[in-house]
Amino acid sequence: MSALLWALVALPLTVGTLLAVAGRPVDRYAPGVAVGTAVAALGLAVAVAFEHPRVEAPLLEGLPAGLAVDGLSGLMVVTVTAVTAAVLLFSVADIGPSEARARFFGLMLLFSGAMLTTVTATTLPVLLMAWEVMGATSWALIGYWWRDPERGDAANTAFLTTRAADLGLYLAAGAALASGQAGSLALEDLTATTGAWSDTITAGVIAAAFGKSAQLPFSFWLSRAMQGPSPVSALLHSATMVVAGAYLLLRLDPLLAQSGWGGQVVAWTGAVTAVVLGLVAVAQTDLKQLLAASTCAQIGFMVLAAGTGAVTGGTLQLIAHAAAKSLAFLVAGTWLTALGTKALPALRGAARRHRTAGITFTVAALALAGVPPLALWAAKDVLLAGALEDNAALYIVGLAGAVISAAYSAKALWFVWQPVAVPDDLEQPLPYAARLPLAALAAACAALTVTSFPPVRDAVERVVGGRAQPVPHLWEFVLSGALAVAVSAMVWMHGPRLTVPSRISAWTGDWLRLENAARTIFVRPVLRLADVLAAFDDRVLDRAVEGTAAGSVRLARWTNAQAERLVDGTVEGAAGGARALGRWARRPQTGQLHQYLAQAVAAFTVLAVVLVLVR
């Protein structure tokens, strides 16, 4: 079975890379290849989910690369591959032949392959590599229409925000390595660290998870991510990147529990995000922005579950949310393609125009609202039971977030179902490739409800493992369901007449102005510092370098002049002396024999005198 696990992660990564590299020449074949790969990956995911294989390969000295499928990751790989297959099938109809299909489908497969590696990673090095690939491919997918500067800027904002938070994971890995207590950096060994090292690892993991899952204060990047194609939003916001942080916190629940403070920080951040971003969703007039804010809020419940140790409830919430949110985004993409708008006032009657899209969107919205008997209603109560056992205040805040989710979901439904005169020539039936995934996801929103009740819930709890989970009481199911129905009915009856003060509406409608705050606190000071450093470079360093160079040139010229005078004088003097000696040596050479005889007599006389004197 280890071969199946390697194939599960290698298949989408390999095919995705080949499609992305091949480019436009294979656009014609890319949709079929991608959908076939996704379906094959789903089959592999189901197989490994039952067998729970574990594999390991050498990576670095003492740091192996490990992958494993257990109960929690088994549920995740099935969820990721199922949603990926549905989204890619829908994309066949949504991404037209004129688009760069090979690049799109290739990047989508790479993205899902990175997510599969993330959820099956057992060591920090592998997790970090998959985490990085997921971030890079999300940047490329959000900026898929890169010729539009606004979309490119949105991709950059999302990428830089998540990358800033990702530094926490590097901090955690560095602390685990420096402590020497985490062995091979296996995730399950992180709890072996103690003291300040353990706190540092916990803080790094929490920061990275909050950034990836768009929890406060990082939520604003998800708003900018809406510039990408609708299938990208459906995949990114349902079962992959945005839930990766929540999954990591659920996976590392023992680490949060050991820290003594991590659980509370995580739980309260999730609860506050569920409430505040729910209010942001209520204030939106753009359907995709509403769904994006609701994603932050819904993931807040998963984070709340991780903080309170309700791993079973958080997992059930994650799976149910994946089905509902991917369905909602796909329908929003359908209406955007057909009607050319995503503004709620302009979408009046959209559900009546496209009945399949309208009915399936209604299922998704009611599921997000927590209306019985759909899946998110029961899943929320399972995780809120953990919050109630931990802290009654957490339960109240979480329940308030659930009530707010009913408000924004009913608001979206009110607009799309309002009667409006529609000319007959605007009626456009959905392609079969679009209808099939919508129907399948809508059915999942209802069918997954059984996972929150015995005996299926007990089986899920045994599979997931971890701490014992509190069981929700009947009154909790009744209370949350009644509140969801009541709030939804009130919003439906009053429609847009339910307003909030303009100041609050402007603040929440602009996503709490978190992006402006980030630019003010971080971006602008960094840019100013960069300007100061650039000016210092130009005015000080450049001038110093140029002055040094000019001085070196002048020194070289002076040295050259002095050395030339000295060397030339020496050479010329030696040459003059040689010439004088030559002249003197030529004088005895007259060519007359008697002079040579006289010179020989003189030489022998001198030699005789020397010999006499030496003796």
Image (cartoon, rainbow, N blue to C red):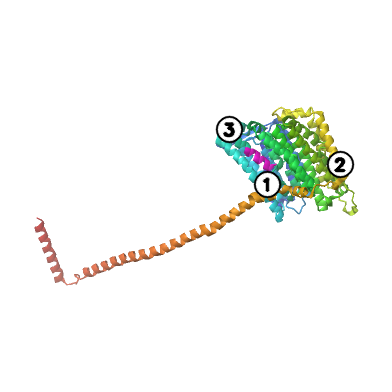
Q: The residue under label 3 is which amino acid type?
A: Gly
**Badge 3 local density, few (<14 within 10 Å), some, or many (20+)?**
few
Q: The residue under label 2 is which amino acid type?
A: Met
Q: Secondary structure at mark 2?
A: helix
Residue placed most toward the observer, 317 or 507: 507
Magenta stretch: give its range: 203-213
Q: Which residue is mark 3?
A: 195
Q: Secondary structure at mark 1?
A: helix
Q: Which residue is mark 2?
A: 490
**Badge 2 local density, few (<14 within 10 Å), some, or many (20+)?**
some
Pointer 3 with pointer 1, Cβ within 8 A: no
Q: Secondary structure at mark 3?
A: helix
Q: Is residue 173 left or right of residue 344?
A: left
Q: If you read the primary sequence from the N terminus, does the residue marked by circle 3 or circle 2 appear first?
A: 3
Alpha carbon separation for disc pair 3 and 1: 37 Å
Residue 596 is covered by the magenta coloring: no
Q: Tell me where residue 256 appears, x and y as whole percent.
A: 65, 33
Q: Is residue 7 visible?
A: no
Alpha carbon separation for disc pair 3 and 2: 52 Å
Residue placed most toward the observer, 350 or 179: 179
Q: Is residue 202 left or right of residue 294?
A: left
Mark 1, mark 2: which one is toward the viewer?
A: 2
On the rendered image, what quadrant is the N terminus found in?
top right
Q: Is residue 169 visible?
A: yes
Q: Which residue is mark 1?
A: 137
